[in-house]
Each structure stands twice: as structure tokens, then as C-alpha cells.
Amino acid sequence: MNRRLQVFLLCLFPVPQFLNPAQAAAQDKAPQVTHGPLWHRLETISTTPAVAGYEWELSERIRTELEGLHPAVDNLGDIVVTIGSGAPHRLVVTPIDEPGFVVSGVTDDGYLRLQRLPQGGLPPIFNELYSAQPVVVRTVSGKWIDGVVGGLSVHLQPGRANSPKSSDIENIYVDIGASSAADVRKAGVENLCPVVMKSSLVALGDRKVAAPWIGDRVGAAALVELLPTLRPAKVNGTLTVAFVVQQRTGARGLQRILSTITADEMVYVGRLLPGGPVPGVENVHRAPRREPGSGVLLGLAQTDGSLIGLAAHLKKLADEQGIPLAADYSAELLPPSYLPLPALPSRWAHIGIATSWPETPAEEVDVSDLAQLTFLLELYMEGPPTDWAMSEHNAPGHAPIAPRELSPLREPLRKLIETYGASHHEEPVRDQVMRLLPPWAKPETDDAGNLILHMGTAPAGSKVPSILFIAHLDEIGYEVKSISKDGRLEAETLGGFDPSFFLGHPALVHTANGDRNAVMELPNGWDEPKFEWPRGTETPVHVDVGARKPDEVEKLGIKVGDTITIPKAYRTLLGTRANGRGFDDRVGCAALISAVSALRGPLKDRDVTFVWSTGEEIGLVGAAALAKRLAAEGRVPDYVFAVDTFVSSDSPLESKRFADAELGNGFVVRAVDNSNIVPRNLVERVVKLARANQIPVQYGVTGGGNDGAAFVRYGSVDVALGWPLRYAHSPAEVIDTRDVDSLARISAVIARGW
């Protein structure tokens, strides 16, 4: 291998993967992508929003990074750097835009309507992959604020015909926590504000990284890292490098460059493009098909192996330096137009690298491919040997929005949300609850993993009613069932949810030694025009952790039985609204913690128990075990207050026929759901008690079940309480924290005086 390339690659990776086998064998652990200069460059560029036509922020970032080269910026936003003079004139072009949306309207009740950019040319499931996902919205002042795309709540769909389809842009609503159009304007959001999926760059296994639409940014990352290292005296003739905008919306930036710059030849650096038809090649709309790790790719309309012109020259450069380079199918760079298209230079070539799950939030690339691409570009530009051990450039991404100060109840909720614990694996959440309880509270853990706190000191035989509050610790997710020969994980669901909210997105595998990054693979046929999401749990789910053999999975510490979830965080929205996956039922857990703290110690002459249960999402497992044990001991509670989500239809996507409890209007008596009916007189009793204590209250009918139902068969009365939740069982879950406050307050009031 060429020594310059070897030195460059070793700067990217902490483990010398490119040394001899004896040296490589000395390494115990699986190699991980290091945070070297090029990695950081890719992270910065891939996570800076740049919706087609609204690339200002990334354009300015690139201009600033290349300021020493005196870049010019045209009125479209294209950035042009010119080095050298005279002939030949070589042009290198890379796009910087990404697909996304802009605000096209605001509803009276404060939801954003969207227009997609581009309107066409994306996978058929593109809109669906945005459904129920966190997003960011750029305000008029340039600040990014958090929001979510609404999604259907799975609990409200049984029996419903012709539910809104998330593939239809008419059913896309963005929720930023506003209650009116005036709230939206006050937040600085107006028509034409761009909206993109909230993203980060995640490392997978030894060399892969994933981020939404990362394939659109590899060329920019390579060139921004490479250009400052070139020595103008070594550049042959004139070299022009253009970072172009609006490639996805008619290639307008590229057309501008081709119309204003006359070049002898051009290298276009960007993702290989699907298209067709190609004679003799089936399913060309699914091409290109190379996998990450293939090295550099040459995009050709015909892939019969013959290379001519500039493509042949690049192949020769690559072969001389040991850079793997292969041809793969790619459609034309310039899309059809009603105007005559500018001519490409007589010599031109399209190069890029392979992606997995292209044009999805889980898109993957191999960083070694990016290193090979960067080195080939250096050779083409005829730069001098480059000092790749240069000091690290870790330019930050767009500045995060400072969260509002959290009240005493919000901070426990944030900690609970950001703790992972799918069904059967609730230990971290249980430990977090124990840390958040006041020091005087001494809970116990039973054989089912339930955390139980007895608060009453009522004497035996007293007529004081026995009361049990219960909220569940677990969250939905997946469990690793097997490890395939090709290193992929096979997983099955834990709980019920819509797979379209999770497949095709980054994920975490929770191991005994910490979390590992992963990607939830999309089902077969995902890029076919008539693709349908699988329903039920019989279809296996495959997960990519960057391994290609079982022993590589073993080195990552991943085992059968480990759980998998989608990454999550507590995010403040406008006003008192918040987003976080797993509010079901971490809100209930937080409310009970707050109620216990408010009670300030054991209750004299009361019989009150607080329970944080396990396995609710997979069939009320912990609650059922506890109910059975208490019945066997003759200690069945008189009343069970199951504190869980009231899945609300407070969303433009849902039918208002039922579940019509609005966010911000108080806790909810869950009078009827799929597992229980609360006696009407007890509904009225809770409502009366709440109003007497000036606690906002609602009541109604919703879907799903609750832990209290497990106690009913033994004689308890289940009085289910909840709070309104939008977009249940999705990454987009939204609450109003005022409802959490009211839920905690009513729980304390009931404990003292029911």
C-alpha cells in the first residue's frame, strides 16, 4: 500500500487495521472510529441543516472554514474557491444541500404545515420516515427550536377505517408546543422557515458512521478538509472547487456553475444517483447497489467495465496508489428541464462512495471509503504530500438551544426519560427511581422486579381503605433473539408500536458493557414504489451494528437477550410543552415520586402503597405477579390507582370521536379503556376531589390497557389516572408539563384523604 495513504488511514483509526496480521492480532478489542480531523469534519458538515434552497448556515460555515482561500459566494449561495491560473482549467463540484421541508402554513391551533423540498425524486417512504420524529425548525432570527412531526397513536387505531396515511404530505403536521397561530409567530416561526430531522453522527462498529442523508455531505467534508492543505505552486493550471446548492431541486447550483465557468474537465463528487432504464439491467431504480467498504465508486450510466477519458485517468491514479475503485450505475447529474441544459465539460467523471439505506435517516457510509476518496482527490488535484497529522479541527455543529431551567419535577422527569429500560430490562430505571426518592423512603424490590414503597401505618383491622398507586418502569423496544452469520442481529419487538417510526433510523444496543450504536434495517422492498410496512411481530427485524461476522459482534459485547431502543432525550418545546420518547410511563413514575416527596414521610392511620412495576408493555407482567401474590397473602388493595398515559386525540391526525383530552388542561381520569371501566360514581369522586383542591382535571375514553386491570379479578377497583399524550409509542411523544404537575398533586391528595 502507498505509504502516504497508509499514514492517512492510520490517522483516522486508533487500531492499526492496515498493518500486518501479526500486529493486528495483538489488538484485543474491536476497533472503533476515532474522532480525528476528517471524522470531525464529516460530523460538523453532516449535522448542519441545509434544506435545498435554504443552505445559508452550512454555506457560511464552509466559507468561514476556507476563508484563507478567499472563497466567492454567489447570490444562490454557491461557494467557489479558485487556486492557480492558466490551463488546464479543472473544476471539482460537490453538492451541500439535503432533502427537508419548509413551513407552508400555520393552523389556527398552532400546528405547522409543510412543503417538501424536493417534491419528487426521493424514496416512496421518505415522508413516512419523518412521521413521529423529532425535528428542528429555524426561526426568522436564525435560532433553531425543537419540534416533532405528529404521528398516529397505535392505541387509537383499532376499529378505525381509512386512517390518515403518513406518506401523504396532507397528513404531516409539526408540533412545536404552540396552542395557537399567535404562539407560533411569537416563537419566530413563519412561512418558509426550514424544517429538518434532528440528527447526529453515530459510529457503528469499526469504521461505519450513520446520519440522515450523510451521502449528500461526504464530498463537502473531503474537500473542506483537503483544500487548505494544497500548495498553490503545485497545482497544475487553474483549479476551481465549487460547493453547490439546490442540487436536489433541479441542480440549480450546478447549472449556475456550468453556465458561468468554462472548464476543460470536471469531477463531480457526490452520491451515486438511482434512475433508469438501463438496457439489459433489471430493477435499475434500485441501483447503485455497492456496499460501504467498496472504496471509491465511479458513477456511470453503463457499467460494462469499460472506462474512457477522465474516468480512465482516475482509475489509473487509484491503481497506482492502491486505492480500490469500482464502477457502479448512476443516473444523470442534470435532471430533465423545460429549459435547455448547460453542457458538461467534454471530460468529466462522477465519483462518490457507497451508502447503505440511502436517503433515509439511517444512511451509512464507511469512513475508510471517505479516506480513500479524499486521497484520490488529492492525487487528482496534484497537491503535495499532505500532513494528515494536522491539528484536529473540531468545529461545533449549529449551537444547541439552551434548555429552560427545570422545576423540581421536570428534573426527575428528564433523568427518567434519559434512562433506558425496555421490558425485562428495567433495572436502570428502577435504580434511577430509587435515587430520586427522598432519603427517608425505603422501597423494596420483589421477585418480579417491582419497586414497592409502603407508606401507611394503619393498624390491622382498621376500616381505612387500602390504596395502591402503580406506574410502570418499562418502555417499548426490541430484544436480540439471534446473531446471523453475516453479523447482523435479529430482534423481536417488546410491546406494541408502529414499525415505521423506528425502522430505518439509528438505534442503540444496550449491553452489559454499555451502549453500542446501531441502525434498524428497513424491510425488503423498502425502496419499491408499492412498498407496504409489515404488520404484526412475525416479521424478523434486522439490526446493523457494523459487524460482518459473529465474532465481531462478540467483540462489541453484544449478546442474545440484549435490548435495542431508539435514542432519546428530554427536549423542551414552546411554553410548557416537552418531547421525549418514553413519556409512557416515565411521566407516571415521576408523578408518583413527586407525590411521595410531597407526603413528607409515612402516613399515620393510612394504608397506602406506591409501586413502580415491570413488564407493563408486554402484558402487565409485574402488576399481575404482584396482584397474585397480594391475593394469596389476603392483602388485596381496595383501590388501585393505575397512573399511566391517557393516549389523546389532541392532534390533527386523530379522530375526535374519543380520547379527546387536550394537553395543558389537567390530568385525566381514564374512565374507559381496553382493559377497564371505572365506576361512574368514582369518576365523579375524583373530579370533585380535584376541583376542591383547585387541580385541573379531565375525564374520558381512550385505548390501551393499564396495570390496575391485573388487580380487578381479585376484588380491587381500578381507578386509572393519566395525562394527555400526543403521538404515543413514538419518538415524537409530547406532553404539557402542567398536566404532570396536576397528576402529581392529585396523587398526593388521594393518598392523604381517599
Image (tube, grey):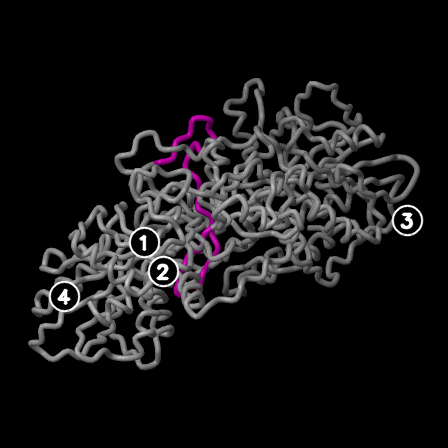
The amino acid type, in three-letter code, at marker 3 is Ala
Badge 4 vs badge 1, beta-carbon distance below 8 Å? no
Badge 2 vs badge 1, beta-carbon distance below 8 Å? yes
Q: CA distance from mark 2 to mark 4?
A: 23 Å
Q: CA distance from mark 4 to mark 3?
A: 85 Å
Going from N to C along the chain, the mark reached first, 4 or 3, is 3
Q: Is residue 128 left or right of residue 618?
A: right
Q: Secondary structure at mark 1?
A: loop
Which is more foreground, mark 2 or mark 3? 2
Mark 3, residue position: 233
Q: Is residue 146 left or right of residue 494?
A: right
Mark 2, residue position: 587
The amino acid type, in three-letter code, at marker 4 is Pro
Mark 1, residue position: 645
Residue 210 place in picture, x, y as percent: 54, 49
Q: Is residue 524 magenta?
A: yes
Specify the label residue 637 is tagged with: 4
* Disc 4 packing (10 Å; few <14; some 14–19; many ≥20): many
Q: Secondary structure at mark 2?
A: helix
The residue sitting at 12% across, 62% down in the picture is 628
Task: Find the magenta span and give its range.
Answer: 507-534
Going from N to C along the chain, the mark reached first, 4 or 1, is 4
Q: Is residue 174 magenta?
A: no
The residue sitting at 9% across, 70% down in the picture is 633
Q: Which residue lies most toward the right here? A: 86
Q: Is residue 383 left or right of residue 456?
A: right
Badge 4 vs badge 3, beta-carbon distance below 8 Å? no
Badge 3 vs badge 1, beta-carbon distance below 8 Å? no
